[in-house]
Amino acid sequence: MIPAEADYVRAVELLRAGELVAFPTETVYGLGADAANPAAVAKIFAAKGRPADHPLIVHLAGHDAVDHWAEQVPAVAWELMETFWPGPLTLILKKQAWVPSTVTGGQDTVGLRMPGHPVALELLRRFAAVAGEHAGIAAPSANRFGRISPTTAAHVQEELGERIQLILDGGPCKVGIESTIVDCSRNEPVVLRPGHIAPAHLEAVLGRQPAIETASGAPRVSGSLAAHYAPQTPMRLIAGQRLLDYLNAQRHKGDRCGVIGHSQPPQAGMPHLWRMLPADPVGYARDLYAALREMDHAGVSAIVVESLPEEAAWAAVTDRLRRAVAGSGQS
Ligand code: TXA
Ligand code: MG
């Protein structure tokens, strides 16, 4: 799906006028504003209901813009950009003094990413053509604060439709979970948020295992709050071998659950709503948020997710599921 010419023109006009535009990226949909315009950026926080100390990612059209936003960019950061941009990798770098503190949540660092989605890149290029070649679009995920990130334009409409004037529709997101965040502002690169680009991929570039620091509760990364990406329906993780017993017990209580499985197929005779996700971590990540959203709307008493394998390849989706469980049930 590709937006019409007129949609791009309107999107750039809105951004120039300090308004918000939602757009697709390969990870999730973003809620964008001119990153150099603090009043425009403030509207993002208002629309999302997000606390002001949570920094935003600045999306760029290319590597050339990086020095405009960041300083003291270490060699490893350039290597990571070379390998993974455009793509689902955000780098935290020392910010240039001029970068508005509304964007950085008052920190001395800035998060930068060149997204790997044709619509996002087209929007960024067109915006830079009128706003200056290094212009960037600040964008968090286009959901209300603490809720599930949107992976389709319809999800954005449901979350923020009344608060924003334009949603560019680029079809469903291919990655489906938010970008991997690597902090390159310290002596050693540190993974702050796991994602599609896994430690093993980073290791291939860095020559060693990156440190991982995804502690919950830390305000530096809002995605690191324990209760994030959460449905309103109570949610729990149940091991595959216990799943059927558990669901049987729920049935006897008269409860209808929404079940998200990947290896345990649906059971005949159960009242539960059952959705099978792909049994590989890439496919699972792509479909997870849409499945959680569907379950959240289905009027089930609980969302029951079959626990995931322990392997490293599943770490990013496991991270999102744990946070969703922690934040679930708070309508
Ligand atoms: O895939 C993604 O990253 C999506 C798409 C739209 O690009 N964006 C996204 O944005 O997930 P958001 O705001 O929902 O999450 C961005 C994360 C937050 O956890 C934020 O705290 C962190 O990036 N972040 C941004 N700047 C930072 C900084 N200077 N230091 C530490 N963390 C930062
Ligand atoms: Mg978010």
Image (cartoon, rainbow, N blue to C red):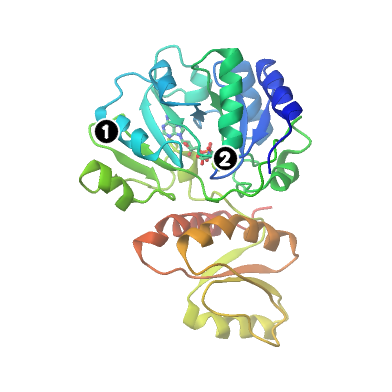
Can residue 217 be seen at all in this image of the molecule? yes
- Quadrant location, the N terminus: top right
Can residue 139 be seen at all in this image of the molecule? no
The residue at which mark 2 appears reads as 25
Q: Which mark is residue 37?
A: none
| Residue at screen point 43% across, 49% down | 195
User: In the figure, is residue 96 to the left or right of 249?
Assistant: left
- Mark 2: secondary structure: loop
| Residue at screen point 45% across, 45% down | 224
User: In the figure, is residue 178 to the left or right of 15?
Assistant: left
Of the image marks 1 and 2, the number of the one nearer the N terminus: 2
The spot of residue 193 in percent (x, y) is 41, 45
| Residue at screen point 42% across, 16% down | 68
The residue at which mark 1 appears reads as 76
In the figure, 17 relative to 114: above or below? above
In the figure, 57 relative to 326: above or below? above
Q: Amino acid at mark 1?
A: Val
User: In the figure, is residue 201 to the left or right of 102?
Assistant: left
